Image (cartoon, rainbow, N blue to C red):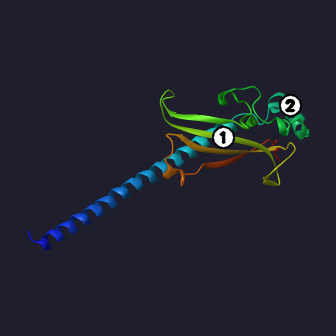
Amino acid sequence: MNTGQTMLTIAALSLLSFVTLRFYSSMGQTGVTLSQSSAGLTATTVITSFIEFAQNTAFDSVTKELPQNVVLSSPSTLTPVGKLGPEGETSYEEFNDFDDFNGATIDYKIGDPERPNEIYKVHFDVYYVNPDNINQISNSQTFLKRMDIKAWRSYPSISPEEATSFDTVRMSTLYAYFKFNPI
């Protein structure tokens, strides 16, 4: 083999190495993207499940005890703004009204509870909001509450490459207390 053929062989092997490296790098990046997409979809599903659970609880602790006409006569009968949160419950399964979720951060395990495949942290904030502007938090009781929920995957840990592009999933829901008056 002469020098020309040797140089051509080296160039061909270099090109093959470069193409192979780019191919596997691209495949690896696709795996990261799929992992991020899966985590985002799962976080959305987890949040939706908590929203459904919360909306099946009472609007407020007093709405379970007092007659509806008494509660509707004055929003001041509702839980004060500074007292929104759990009333002694230690687990979200025990929460019995909407504002019990306020300030809670829950580790939601997917798979076997002893050896979960994934763990998502889910954080809740509950506010009274202005009925005329649901983006405005009210400093007093109203018949409208908003729950802001954030969820992110905490296990398996996110690689430094993923951490720069993976974001927390955020959702909100409203819960109103009213009496329907048929015509």
Residue 125 location, x and y as percent?
72, 42
Q: What residue is rendered at 60% in x and 39% in y?
A: 121
Marks 1, 2: nearer the viewer: 1
Q: Residue 11 vs residue 169: left or right?
A: left
Residue 158 location, x and y as percent?
51, 45
Task: Return the residue nearer the eye: 80 or 78.
Answer: 80
Q: Quadrant of residue 56?
A: top right
Q: How many tags in the picture?
A: 2
Task: Return the residue nearer the eye: 165 or 133.
Answer: 165
Q: Residue 170 vs residue 141: left or right?
A: left
**Structural crowding at the residue carrying mark 2, measured as other residues with C-alpha within 10 Å and reported as few (<14), some (14–19) or many (≥20):** few
- Circle 2 sits on which residue? 67
Give the secondary structure at mark 2.
loop
Q: Which mark is residue 148?
A: none
Q: What residue is rendered at 79% in x and 36% in y?
A: 84
Question: As shown in the figure, which amino acid type bears the numbered disc 2?
Answer: Pro
Asked if residue 61 is positioned above or below residue 19 in the image, the reply reads above
Residue 63 location, x and y as percent?
81, 33
Asked if residue 2 is positioned above or below residue 69 in the image, the reply reads below
Task: Return the residue nearer the eye: 117 or 5.
Answer: 5
Task: Return the residue nearer the eye: 144 or 13.
Answer: 13
Question: As shown in the figure, which amino acid type bears the numbered disc 1?
Answer: His
Asked if residue 67 is positioned above or below residue 128 in the image, the reply reads above
Residue 42 location, x and y as percent?
53, 44
Question: Which mark sits nearer the N-terminus, 1 or 2?
Answer: 2
Q: Residue 110 vs residue 50: left or right?
A: left
Q: Quadrant of residue 74?
A: top right
- Circle 1 sits on which residue? 123
Q: What residue is rendered at 57% in x and 35% in y?
A: 108
In which quadrant of the rendered image does the N terminus lie? bottom left
